[in-house]
Image (spheres, rainbow, N blue to C red):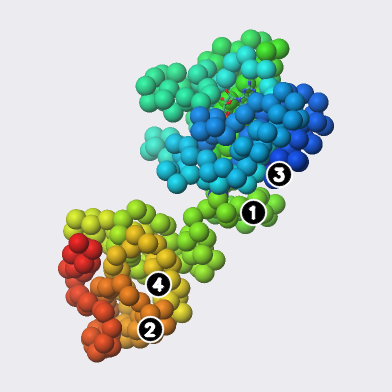
Amino acid sequence: MKIHEYQAKNVLREYDIPIPRGDVAETAEKAKEIAASLKTKVVVKAQIHAGGRGKGGGVKLASSPEEAYAAAKAILGMTLVTHQTGPEGKLVQRVLVEEASQIGKELYLSLVVDRARDRECVVFMASEAGGMDIEEVARTSPEKIIKVAVHPAVGFTAFQARKLAYGLGLDKAQIAQFTNIAKSLYRLFIDKDASLVEINPLVITADGNLLAVDTKINLDDDGLFRHPELKDLRDESEENPLEVVAKNTGVNYIKLDGNVGCMVNGAGLAMTTMDLIKLAGGEPANFLDVGGGASADQIEKAFRILTSDPNVKTILVNIFGGILRCDRVAMGLIQASKSIDMKLPMVVRLQGTNVEEGRKLLKESGLKFEVADELFEAAQKAVALTK
Ligand code: GDP
Ligand code: MN
């Protein structure tokens, strides 16, 4: 789960990591009030679940409350397009208004889970070349990024903190500040079951102090049950609407860019189905695992999700009937197709218990089912129907 910058900064504050003073606003009037109460120059920042806001026009400096009002007016309601939002962009509903920082230098600091085989642990990444072009730095001069792997049993050590700090070229006073920040950040990462914590830029201010000017925290969904206070930070308006519906109905759905809608029971079978669609020359529109049940009601919900994606031209149903009998699945498919008045062609591949009865029901239903025996054949038929 992603959270907004202002929410992530509240978490940093909990861990005594220095952040600028500020508050979040949903209106330009409120932004002006915040700027007036800060009594300094401010920065007005779009709050969306994507980075690259600076380059997209979502970060503006303002020297007075009036300018803050104008900046907020311009940013709120805009559809911000950045390299992370995709071409459709994201609607800005809130801005963070903060005391503007006097920036001396922009550093980069993050914690991620490194899944590489020889590591399989949490890794600190730091760079002297922080700021808006860090992705470019990672691509063109990866040697400018220092990595330190944290052993889970040993934890983050003072020696490792110094290694990062020297690599960042910090002076003595800054090394002490940095060590505190890095230690807190590691503690936060572990405590909160994060999957990513990033401070970019970690600023060296004009007077030589360290300050977290931008931050990003991603949380592991499977750890959220341990953090009810973080669960409440979810902003569903930032997430894919179909995925939100799916999550609330207990269906595992991930939207993709192709045009063959897939409905499968079991995650492994769903992955295989997507592979075979590709092998047949097509592109899957989604991953969808209806789970073990696949009742008529669940199939109907899954159909509704699939058909609300305008890219979907045909639907491939691949169900293995183990405990679940194929005739039951067939009845579910027929009932669901009728109740949503399904217009799209469907290819159905059933295997398992009572498969003959299931196929017979589908063929005699008078609905647009193409029945396939083998999975690859089903994938080929589905792809052919999109052409
Ligand atoms: P991002 O583009 O979404 O990563 O947003 P950031 O919050 O990182 O802001 C982008 C850039 O704007 C930063 O790298 C800074 O160069 C600049 N910036 C952000 N806040 C301030 C500020 O308070 N003062 C100054 N002078 N520049 C800022
Ligand atoms: Mn940033």
> If the image is split into quadrants, where does the C terminus sit?
bottom left
Residue 6 x %, y %? 67, 39
Q: Mark 3 against mark 1, which lies toward the viewer? A: 3
The local secondary structure at tag 2 comes to helix
Query: Which residue does the numbered mark 2 point to in the structure image?
Result: 338
Give the image location of residue 189, x and y in percent: 60, 39
- The answer, for residue 322, to whether it is visible in the render is no
Could you tell me how far apart the alpha carbons at marks 3 and 1 are, in whole angstroms? 25 Å
Is 377 left or right of 60, judged from the image as shown? left
Q: Quarter of the picture for ligand 1?
A: top right
Label 3 environment density (alpha carbons within 10 Å; few <14, some 14–19, many ≥20): some
Question: Which comes sooner in the sequence, label 3 or label 2?
Answer: 3
Closer to the chain start, of discs 3 and 1, is 3
**What's the CA distance linking mark 4 and mark 3?**
39 Å
Q: Secondary structure at mark 1?
A: helix
CA distance for labels 2 and 1: 38 Å
Determine the residue positioned at 62% across, 57% down: 225
The numbered mark at residue 303 is 4
Gap between marks 4 and 1 measured at Cα = 28 Å
The type of residue carrying mark 1 is Lys
Q: Which comes before the other along the chain, label 2 or label 1?
A: 1
Query: In screen coordinates, is 110 left or right of 181?
Result: left
SS state under label 3: loop
Discs 3, 1 touching: Cβ within 8 Å: no
Q: Which residue is mark 3?
A: 27
Q: Which mark is residue 231?
A: 1
| Label 2 packing within 10 angstroms: few (<14), some (14-19), many (20+) | few
Q: Is mark 4 within 8 Å of ligand 1?
A: no
Q: Position of residue 149 (x, y in %)?
A: 49, 30
